[in-house]
Image (cartoon, helix red, strand yellow):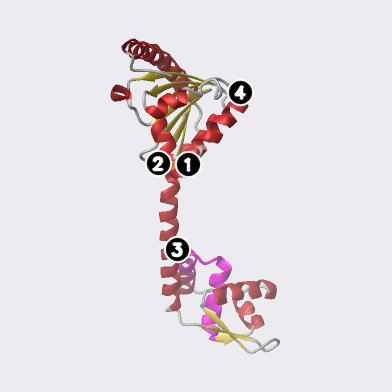
Amino acid sequence: MNKDTLEIKEILIKSGFSDNESAVFLALLQLGRGTVSQITRKAGLNRTTGYDILDSLVSKGLVSVSGKEPKQEYLAESPDHLIGILERQAKEAQKKISAIKKIIPNLKSIHNVAGRPKVRFYEGTEGLKDVYEDTLTSHEQIRAYANVNEMHQALIGYFPKYYERRASKNISIKAIIPDSPIGKHRASKDADEKRESTLVPVEKYNFSPEINIYDNKVMIASWREKLGIIIESAEIADAMKKIYELAWIGAKTESAKMEESGNISL
């Protein structure tokens, strides 16, 4: 194989062809047409390998076949076909790049780096259900900031069964809830749903999104943006639990003020 042919072969290999594909394609270009035996002899390969390589080149549109065995011959197509192949590969590569870019945030969120909190993102209605399903794995009482109005509007029909399932798993919950009519109604079911609620003035604390703190996790459910987030970190969860206990004391004070003024009734 002369210097020019070697250089051409190297370029073909860099363009995505295997060593054997390059050898067979160059041999067939030089022959124009030939049988498997003729082509593999010129390419310096065995006959069995030649069949596989020729089939690959046929599938790429660089080689065509005429006749039937034992007189079957292979014909080299115009080298111009190489440009079309590379253009198609470039388009496919761009599609793959675009697809990978979309999932990079998800891949990063599950990337387990030692000592770093795990953050998982969930989108849409099903994603919000997924983050709530995770709370049913809790091994301790859940601490929650819960806007019942938005919860029930976002996941219509989901929560009655959820409350039953949580209670059946003996997972209790401590909840700070805005004092809306539906919030009051929910609090009235505390005993059945294994919940301890404290109502706070809705005009001052109509918060969103919902936050649940349990085990080593902090779950955030944004009903308006249809986005769920679970942060898994013992340090962050511990800090959020302590902050919650301070908030609980404040919520109890606000609730007592409402009771004194006659603005709350369960």
Circle count? 4
Expressed as whole percent of the image width and height from the top left, the position of residue 192 reads: 56, 23
Q: Is residue 111 visible?
A: no
Q: Are marks 2 and 1 in contact (CB under 8 Å)?
A: yes
Q: Is residue 112 left or right of residue 95?
A: right
Q: CA distance from mark 2 to mark 1?
A: 8 Å
Q: Which residues are magenta?
A: 9-32
Magenta run includes residue 134? no
Of residues 266 and 148, the one nearer the viewer is 266
* Mark closer to the chain start, 4 or 2: 4
Q: Return the residue at label 4.
A: 170
Kind of residue indicated by mark 3: Glu
In front of the other: 264 or 14: 264
Quadrant position of residue 243: top left
Instruction: Estimate the spatial distance between the alpha carbons at disc 4 and disc 1, rounded to whole Å.
Output: 24 Å
The residue identified by callout 2 is 226
Residue 160 percent coordinates (x, y): 53, 34
- Which image quarter is the C terminus in? top left
Q: Main secondary structure of the magenta part?
A: helix
- Residue under label 1: 127
195 lies above or below 34: above
Tag 1: amino acid:
Gly
Which residue has dot 3 on it?
A: 92
State the residue at coordinates (63%, 83%). Answer: 38
